[in-house]
Image (cartoon, coloured by chain):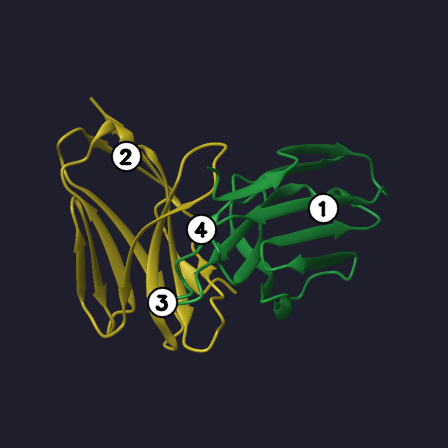
Amino acid sequence: DQQVKQNSPSLSVQEGRISILNCDYTNSMFDYFLWYKKYPAEGPTFLISISSIKDKNEDGRFTVFLNKSAKHLSLHIVPSQPGDSAVYFCAASGRGSWGKLQFGAGTQVVVTP
Amino acid sequence: DTAVSQTPKYLVTQMGNDKSIKCEQNLGHDTMYWYKQDSKKFLKIMFSYNNKELIINETVPNRFSPKSPDKAHLNLHINSLELGDSAVYFCASSPPSGPSYEQYFGPGTRLTVT
């Protein structure tokens, strides 16, 4: 059973515009959420995270928003750059899970000039 | 100065063979993981070791056996390979302090079973 869902397999956005990636989860025990970025033939790299006690975390061009009541989080990339073209994975973990991450299926982002 | 490395990067083998994938991290991390990314692109955790002790063992066929000779290494041995084992296998590690959720991944090993 997929407890973390990314319902948009792909997203195309123009350079300079905002990219918004969405993620939904079903397990209310999750207390930490992460976004990973993955280029072809490479491993995922950590991008940004948010604890369940917060509703927003910002790091440069990347902002993650968490809506616990809706069990929904989103990643905003502003402005989008060609180097942001990659697959973005949403992941979640629960307290005491020894770092066991549950991943979504990923969203392929393509930033066009 | 590679952080998490895996060998080999590609592995093509026939059904029934036994193969191993090696992983090494030079980050000083205490915890290491093996993930499998299947054809549907889902990343799923298989095993995790903390200080050479197995702490996560998901529902994985016992043909898969992880071994951690020391904190910096976590190897994955697969016996009697099957077609369904074809996937990309990622090793990861996480630091001893701070959220263990922030994991650092290796480049992956693409295993193809024919």
User: Which SS class for mark 1?
Assistant: helix
Whole-number angstrom distance, CA of label 2 to CA of label 1: 32 Å
Tell me whether marks 2 and 4 sit on the same chain.
no
**Residue assigned mark 1:** B84
Residue type marked 1? Gly
Q: Are marks 1 and 4 on the same chain?
A: yes
Q: Earlier in the sequence, mark 1 or mark 3?
A: 1
The quarter of the picture where residue B11 lies is top right
Q: Which residue is mark 2?
A: A84
Q: Residue at x 13, y 35 (%)?
A: A17
Q: Is residue A48 above or below residue B17?
A: below
Q: Residue at x 39, y 58 (%)?
A: B102
Tag 1 subunit: B
Q: Amino acid at mark 4?
A: Tyr
Chain shown green: that is B
Q: Which residue is mark 4?
A: B104
- The verdict on a common chain for dots 1 and 3 is yes
Q: Residues within 10 Å of mark 1 (few under 14, many from 20)?
A: few
Q: Are marks 2 and 4 in contact (CB under 8 Å)?
A: no
Mark 1 and mark 3 in contact? Answer it, CB < 8 Å: no
Viewer-nearest residue: B82 or B70: B70
Query: x, y (%) of residue A15?
Result: 17, 28
Residue that mark 3 sits on? B98
Q: Residue at x 39, y 70 (%)?
A: A26
Task: State which chain is coloured yellow.
Answer: A
Q: Nearer the viewer, residue B82 or B46?
A: B46
**Front of the two marks 3 and 2:** 3
- At label 2, counting other C-alpha atoms closer than 10 Å, the crowd grade (few under 14, some 14-19, many 20 or more) is some
Task: Name the disc covering residue B5, or none.
Answer: none
For mark 2, name the chain.
A
Q: Residues within 10 Å of mark 3 (few under 14, many from 20)?
A: few
Contact between labelled residues 2 and 3, with CB atoms less than 8 Å apart: no
